């Protein structure tokens, strides 16, 4: 089955209009085909109940970024899907719904684990910040980004930047970075505001995924009108264990 047919076969497993499925929908349906591999369960079945998507990304050139939907209430099928898709000893980066965590902890050796809260911008609460220091450019992925530069006679450096991790026709996830010595000036908030306005004007709902322990970043999002969707997702760096 070619990739286009595989993508059609798993569409019923995701609702790409919902924030909870947005990142999985991107990697399942919109990530570049040459950088995407899908494994379906059951294999060669007319009714697919689960899948794993392996994506090559700039996040890590050597370990695939994996999103997935496991067969509902089918422990045997879930285990079979994972072992059909990954060889024991393979290192991966897993982005997964939090309810999959107990099974994945049993199947994988976990090297790091982070819980992400998903925030969505409420357009009615959004008040753009006008900052003349913010300019638009393109990120390394070719997508727009908004930056603040610090220019001196010695150097020209980007001290705050908001980019797009991924986007679908309906959503886009915003990333932000502020150089440590330039924090607490509102510059991170300014570039995120510019990016959020750009996305709204282009018909996409901005999303913001943040570690639940990152209080300053959460406060930044809330100040701009992002609200907690209640969705919790897990980011794991892990290696598949041998079959028992």
Image (cartoon, rainbow, N blue to C red):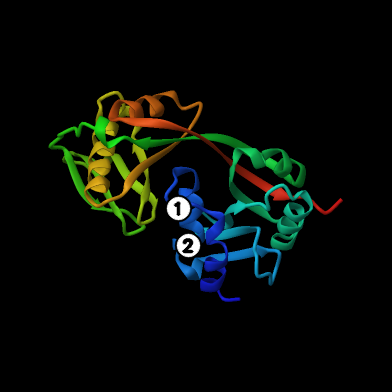
104 horizontally vs 206: left or right:
right
46 horizontally vs 8: left or right:
right
Disc 2: which residue: 29
Q: Quadrant of the N terminus?
A: bottom right
Image mark count: 2
178 horizontally vs 244: left or right:
left
Give coordinates of residue 174: x percent, y percent. Answer: 36, 43
Disc 1: which residue: 16
Give coordinates of residue 40: x percent, y percent. Answer: 65, 64
Residue at 38% over, 41% down: 207
- Asked whether the beta carbons under mark 2 and mark 1 sit within 8 Å of each other, the answer is yes
Q: Is residue 180 visible?
A: no
Callout in the foreground (2, 1): 1
119 or 159: which is nearer to us? 119
Give neighbour class at mark 1: few <14, some 14-19, many 20+ (Cα, 10 Å). Answer: many
74 or 237: which is nearer to us? 74
């Amino acid at each position: 089955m070619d990739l286009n047919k595989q993508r059609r076969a798993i569409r019923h497993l995701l609702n790409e209009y919902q924030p909870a499925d947005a990142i999985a929908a991107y990697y399942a349906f919109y990530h570049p085909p040459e950088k995407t591999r899908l494994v379906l369960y059951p294999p060669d079945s007319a009714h697919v109940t689960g899948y794993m998507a392996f994506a090559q990304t700039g996040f890590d050139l050597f370990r695939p970024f994996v999103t997935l939907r496991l067969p509902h209430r089918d422990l045997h099928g879930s285990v079979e899907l994972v072992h059909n898709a990954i060889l024991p000893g393979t290192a991966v980066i897993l982005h997964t719904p939090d309810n999959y965590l107990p099974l994945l902890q049993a199947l994988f050796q976990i090297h790091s684990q982070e819980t992400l809260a998903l925030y969505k911008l409420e357009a009615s609460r959004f008040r753009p910040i006008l900052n003349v220091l913010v300019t638009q450019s393109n990120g390394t992925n070719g997508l727009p980004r908004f930056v603040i530069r610090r220019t001196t006679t010695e150097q020209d450096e980007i001290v705050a930047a908001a980019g797009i991790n991924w986007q679908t026709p309906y959503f886009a996830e915003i990333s932000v970075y502020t150089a440590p010595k330039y924090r607490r000036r509102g510059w991170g908030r300014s570039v995120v505001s510019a990016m959020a306005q750009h996305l709204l004007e282009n018909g996409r709902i901005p999303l913001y995924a943040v570690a639940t322990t990152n209080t300053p970043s959460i406060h930044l999002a809330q100040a701009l009108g992002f609200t907690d969707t209640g969705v919790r997702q897990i980011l794991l760096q892990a290696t598949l264990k041998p079959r028992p």
